[in-house]
Image (cartoon, rainbow, N blue to C red):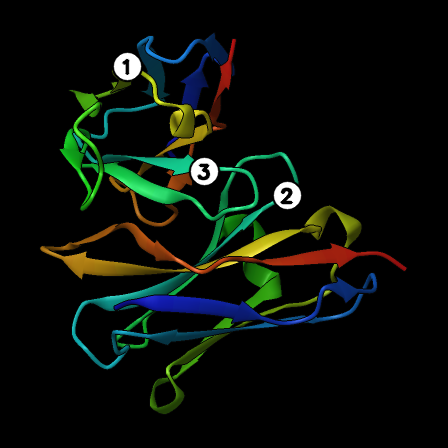
Amino acid sequence: QVTLRESGPALVKPTQTLTLTCTFSGFSLSTNGMSVSWIRQPPGKALEWLALIDWDDDKYYSTSLKTRLTISKDTSKNQVVLKMTNMDPVDTATYYCTRITYNNGFYDYFDYWGQGNLVTVSS
Amino acid sequence: EVVLTQSPATLSLSPGETATLSCRASQPISNYLAWYQQKPGQAPRLLIYDASNRATGIPARFSGSGSGTDFTLTISSLEPEDFAVYFCQQRANWPPPTFGGGTKVEIK
């Protein structure tokens, strides 16, 4: 059974760095094809993909947020960490971690999601 | 970056009716499109992948079609639990995977 759970602060101040941790079970990031992505959703708005890290430690970032994001993994702990620097009120959103697999030269779809971590950016 | 445009933004229907949702891509993406359902306070759930394949456990009243730039999600005979927001997402061009803006299916 695959599960993911996000943890992190509910409130951050402008200019601070956000650190979110995704703790998962039911799969391993040392297994070929396994990957974890972060996606966010401002209240009442659409989904926005942020970053991905895969079993081979390849990392991909949203072009518009690339300079602010860092994704990393701890395979032994089954955790993926996302850091976002210089937080702004427009970054207020629910942040989801998701599982995604890589098959036949393509990343598939986001088949398992955490419940989300609502982050509010306010002074 | 592939832009996905969903229409309509809101669909007002009664239980038992059929919902037809559209997703249009800014460039051809073959059949590399998925649909997700999101209920209030919940994470999205994968419904349809590769345009027409139902994910595990998804009822047969959900069906997807399309290829290239035009895609459709059809929900036959709406059940009360189907009233939700639906997003499409493409995986043809990575990165980034992109999502549509969503269609809300509400009770009329």
Whole-percent x and y of residue B45? Answer: 36, 44
Note whether A46 is above or below B104 in the view shown. Answer: below
Q: Nearer the viewer, mark 2 or mark 3?
A: 3
Distance of mark 2 from mark 3, alpha carbons? 14 Å
Whole-percent x and y of residue A3? Answer: 36, 67
Marks 1/2 same chain = no
Residue found 47% across the figure and 12% down from its top: B11
Secondary element at tag 3: strand
Label 3 is placed on what type of residue? Answer: Gln
Q: Label 1, on which residue?
A: B77
Whole-percent x and y of residue A55? Answer: 26, 75
Q: Nearer the viewer, residue A122 or B29?
A: A122
Q: Label 2, on which residue?
A: A42
Marks 2/3 same chain = no
Note whether A4 is above or below A40 in the view shown. Answer: below
Q: Quadrant of residue A99?
A: bottom left
Tell whether B101 sits left or right of B79.
Answer: right
